[in-house]
Amino acid sequence: MTQPDLSMDAAVTALAGVDRPRDRDASETYARVWWSVLAEPGDGAAGELVARFGPEDALRIALSDVDDEWSSARSRWMPRADSGAVRRALDAARRAGARLLVPSDPRWPSRLHDLGTHAPHVLWLRGDPEPAESAPTVAIVGARAATPYGEAVAADLAAELAASGVVVVSGAAYGIDGAAHRAALSTEGRTIAFLAGGVDRAYPRGHESLLASIAKSGAVVSETPCGAAPTKWRFLSRNRLIAAVADAVIVVEAGHRSGSLNTAAHAAQLGRALGAVPGPVTSAASAGSHRVLREFDGVCVTSAADVREMLGGPVAAPPTPDGRTDETSRLLDALSSRVGRDTEDVARRAGFAYADAQALLGLAELDGRAARGEDGLWRSVKRGR
């Protein structure tokens, strides 16, 4: 294959409208774009080659026909050595208004360096590239097929943390991820979504408007080039980025084999603080969370205060009257400390949908404000001041 033209002039022309690197960085940035097309996320051989020789010389070695120690890896890179593919990725980025971020940029998330040779070559993003470490960062992850309880807990955690200045990171999937992103946005907080495919392709499609909202005030990020499709492997590889950029990773709700456990494993390997929200012992949706508590020595998380403690307490809780949200107040007003009421009755009295009342009752129980008796009925619990 003909070696790509990595000269400064060629690089500046290729990157026009996508990146404005300093002249001395243009060739390196363009070479990294090539690497993001050639190699799958987390390719250790590609990372080692770039670390040893720099992205430009590494690319020339990768695309040579020499029989050397890189021959095995070269066999998987060469089928993608297509200048047309690189050009199409950059064209798609221009259409999407995406930008590039490279490790030499001061806005690069420095925690990604902890991934070593498995760190991304370049990040493609829509939105503000403000470094995540400018504020405490918490990843909130969990099941796509979440229960109302799980989504309510995720939203409660994300809203309170984002309102107090914490950056909320997740993967933009249905269920827990989406609930966390939406709640952070509702408080005008900052949230970042890491995708498994190109940032020009909304995935899932049902979250197209959510991703657009995230890009306005936060960032939508991927290490795969624009136009790349999300695959099962890329989802798993994407999880290492979510774990790496965070100070703490919280698994809200996850099945026994949930992909969120993959994120938890990366967090444990990287030395990040790790926590999980407990659920009913009979709920399959919380089996993975319980595994985090049991097998990963995770912190039991029942409130945003627990998460702030995991962060070392740098962020104060936002003030709320009597420590309660309006919805919690409505719920407690519908309960009695003397007369037990079933969930349907509580929902009717408070003006909630049944599923919302069920979720809020679960939160109130965790907070010690409500209790369910042996008769299955709910009662409020008075707490000392």
Image (cartoon, rainbow, N blue to C red):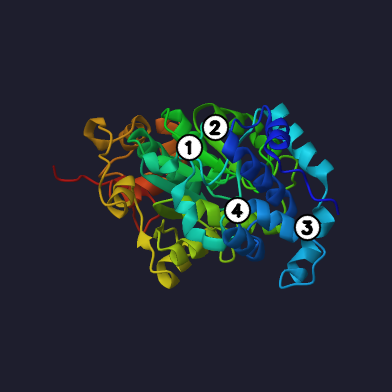
N-terminal of the pair, mark 3 or mark 4, is 3
Nearest the viewer among 77 and 294 is 77
| Circle 4 crowding by C-alpha within 10 Å: few under 14, some 14–19, many from 20 | many
Quadrant of the frame with the N terminus: bottom right
Q: Which mark is residue 191?
A: 1
At horizontal 46% and vertical 67% (from top left) the residue drawn is 269
Tell me, for residue 66, which label it has, or none: none
Q: Which residue is mark 3?
A: 63
Q: CA distance from mark 1 to mark 3?
A: 38 Å
**Which residue is labeled 2 in the image?**
214
Residue 146 as seen in the image, left or right of residue 325: right
Disc 3 versus disc 4: distance between alpha carbons?
26 Å
Q: Which residue type does callout 4 highlight?
A: Arg
Vertical placement of residue 61 versus 381, above or below: below
Q: Which residue is mark 4?
A: 238
The first of marks 2 and 1 along the sequence is 1
